[in-house]
Structures are given as structure tokens and as C-alpha cells.
Image: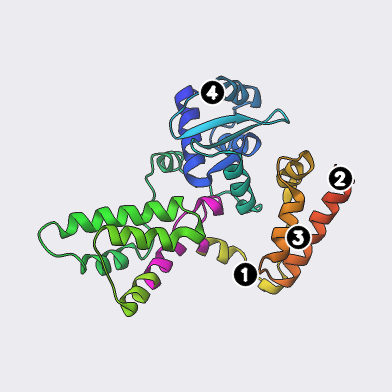
């Protein structure tokens, strides 16, 4: 593979997933380049590690792997992203050019995009209403693709104010109903590139019987101390989760704590 081809993959990894381990990146690249070897991929990553790169960065780990992630991510951001992934499957399309296009920010317009666009367009007046509408829609899509789920509404509300759009309670409800529909069909980093609706269709099971595996990567990070297992356990205990899922997560975390052994504090 050429250096430029590796870079195209790294950009797509960042846009679709936020962060990815080199082991997982290798599996995805090999889907399109069957002859690719780990030695070849690691040589390219080694060349790029800890260097100034635009959009992405390559960080070596303590277990001789690499993390490819957003250029602005720090350790906390990386841990948070891996926590949100929670072993969701990676979204990978079959068309290489389409996959690389994600790295350029070229996402498909989500279903229901036009409905929200028409709703917003009515709020603008004058000859430049289409230009303003498209710019605002671009901003909304950027927020959906890059903001944390809990911050999406606040970030979008602030953006609407910047464009001078003020709505009464009924209009706000109508807007956010359309926004939720749009978000449900948008590819999100925290979902490893899947849309929320795609994940829901994959999980056609009773939510009360859903369990959750921490997975090899997160378990390794807890054992090595890269992530604080005690802090995460406390967080899970406070989360509103289906009973079986919460019980299963707590069991796994307590098992990791037993493996780590006692912690002695001065």
C-alpha cells in the first residue's frame, strides 16, 4: 500500500469511529487489501507516531500497538470514546472509494434531511435564505457527527441562536422531533460509524434481557491502569441501565478488580 492510501484509511477511521486500535484498523484495511501485512502497516504507523498530522494522530500504546484517533483527542477523550463503543460492530461499507470519502467528510445525506431543511428554511427571509439554510444544516450535521450525544441539543440550540432563529415552545418541540429523526439516521462516532437506527435494527431483542461484554480491549485497559476500574464501577452503579445489563457490567468490573489484586493507599 502507498503512504497516501494509508492516510485515506486513517482519515476515515477518525471521521467514522473517533478512535481505533491498530489491530482493528488492520482487519478493516485487509478487507480491501488482502495482501497487506501487519509488518507493513506497523511500519507506516511507526513512521507517523507522535508527529504533527492534520485531522488524525498516531499514538503508541504500552502493549506495542497503536491508537489512531482525532488530532485533538487527549487520553481522557480516547478512553471515553472506547467506553462509548462498548464492542459495537464497526461500520464498513463494501465500496473502497465510498469508505475513503467519509475521511473527507463526505457523508451521505441522512434520511429526513430534507424535512428538517424545509422546516428551517421557513425561518429565514430574503434572497439568501437558501444559502443560510444550507450553512445552518451543515452546522447541524457537524454537531451530530462530532458532539457527544448529551451535548447535541445544547450545541444545536446555541447554533440556532447564532443564526437569529427564535422559536416558541411548540416550534422548538417540532424542530427537535425532526432533529431526533435526523440524528437517528446519521453515522455517529460513538456507534463506530453506525446510525442509531441501524444498531436498533441489529438488536431486535428485549432490552431488559440485553447483557454487555466489556471486551478484550477495555479489560486490558482496566488491568493496565489506563482506565480507572474503580471510577468506572462507581459510574456504572449510578447509570440508569436495564437491570440485567447493569448487573452483568458490575460483575465483570468486580472480576477485573479481583484480578488486579488489593490496592494499598498511604
Which residue position is annotated with label 1? 204
Q: Earlier in the sequence, mark 3 or mark 1?
A: 1
Q: Circle 3: is it few (<14), some (14-19), or many (20+) Cα within 10 Å?
A: some
Q: Quadrant of residue 23?
A: top right
- Dot 4 lies on which element? helix
Which residue position is annotated with label 4? 48
Q: Identify the residue shown where x is 66% and y is 72%.
A: 207
Q: Quadrant of residue 79?
A: top right
Which residue position is annotated with label 2? 263
- Is residue 53 within the magenta segment? no
- Dot 3 lies on which element? helix
Q: Identify the residue shown where x is 73% and y is 47%.
A: 228
Q: Earlier in the sequence, mark 3 or mark 4?
A: 4
The x and y percentages for residue 190 are: 55, 52
Q: Identify the residue shown where x is 69% and y is 71%.
A: 242
Q: Quadrant of residue 249?
A: bottom right
Say which mark, if any, is on residue 249.
3
Q: Circle 4: is it few (<14), some (14-19), or many (20+) Cα within 10 Å?
A: some
Q: Circle 2: is it few (<14), some (14-19), or many (20+) Cα within 10 Å?
A: few
> What are the residue bounds of the magenta stretch?
177-196
Say whether marks 3 and 4 touch (CB < 8 Å): no
Real-space CA distance between mark 1 and mark 2, rounded to the nearest whole angstrom: 41 Å
Nearest-to-viewer mark from 2 and 3: 2
Real-space CA distance between mark 3 and mark 4, rounded to the nearest whole angstrom: 36 Å
- Hey, which residue is sitting farthest front in the picture? 266
Real-space CA distance between mark 3 and mark 1, rounded to the nearest whole angstrom: 21 Å
Amino acid at each position: 500500500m502507498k503512504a497516501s492510501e494509508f492516510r485515506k484509511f486513517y482519515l476515515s477511521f477518525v471521521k467514522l469511529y473517533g478512535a481505533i486500535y491498530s489491530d482493528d484498523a488492520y482487519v478493516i484495511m485487509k478487507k480491501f487489501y488482502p495482501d497487506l501485512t501487519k509488518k507493513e502497516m506497523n511500519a507506516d504507523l511507526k513512521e507517523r507516531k507522535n508527529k504533527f498530522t492534520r485531522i488524525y494522530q498516531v499514538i503508541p500504546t504500552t502493549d506495542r500497538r497503536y491508537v489512531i484517533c482525532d488530532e485533538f483527542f487527549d487520553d481522557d477523550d480516547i478512553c471515553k470514546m472506547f467506553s462509548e463503543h462498548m464492542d459495537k460492530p464497526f461500520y464498513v461499507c463494501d465500496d473502497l472509494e465510498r469508505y475513503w470519502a467519509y475521511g473527507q467528510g463526505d457523508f451521505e445525506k441522512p434520511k429526513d434531511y430534507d424535512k428538517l431543511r424545509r422546516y428551517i428554511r421557513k425561518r429565514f427571509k430574503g434572497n439568501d435564505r437558501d444559502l443560510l439554510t444550507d450553512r445552518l444544516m451543515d452546522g447541524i450535521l457537524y454537531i451530530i457527527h462530532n458532539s457527544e450525544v448529551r451535548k447535541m441539543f445544547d450545541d444545536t440550540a446555541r447554533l440556532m441562536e447564532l443564526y437569529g432563529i427564535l422559536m416558541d415552545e411548540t416550534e422548538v418541540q417540532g424542530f427537535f422531533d425532526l432533529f431526533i429523526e435526523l440524528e437517528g439516521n446519521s453515522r455517529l462516532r460513538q456507534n463506530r460509524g453506525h446510525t442509531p437506527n441501524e444498531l436498533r435494527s441489529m438488536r431486535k431483542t428485549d432490552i431488559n434481557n440485553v447483557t454487555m461484554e466489556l471486551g478484550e480491549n477495555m479489560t486490558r485497559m482496566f488491568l493496565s491502569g489506563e482506565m480507572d476500574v474503580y471510577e468506572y464501577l462507581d459510574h456504572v452503579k449510578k447509570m440508569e441501565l436495564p437491570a440485567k445489563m447493569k448487573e452483568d457490567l458490575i460483575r465483570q468490573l468486580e472480576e477485573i478488580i479481583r484480578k488486579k489484586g488489593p490496592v494499598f493507599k498511604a
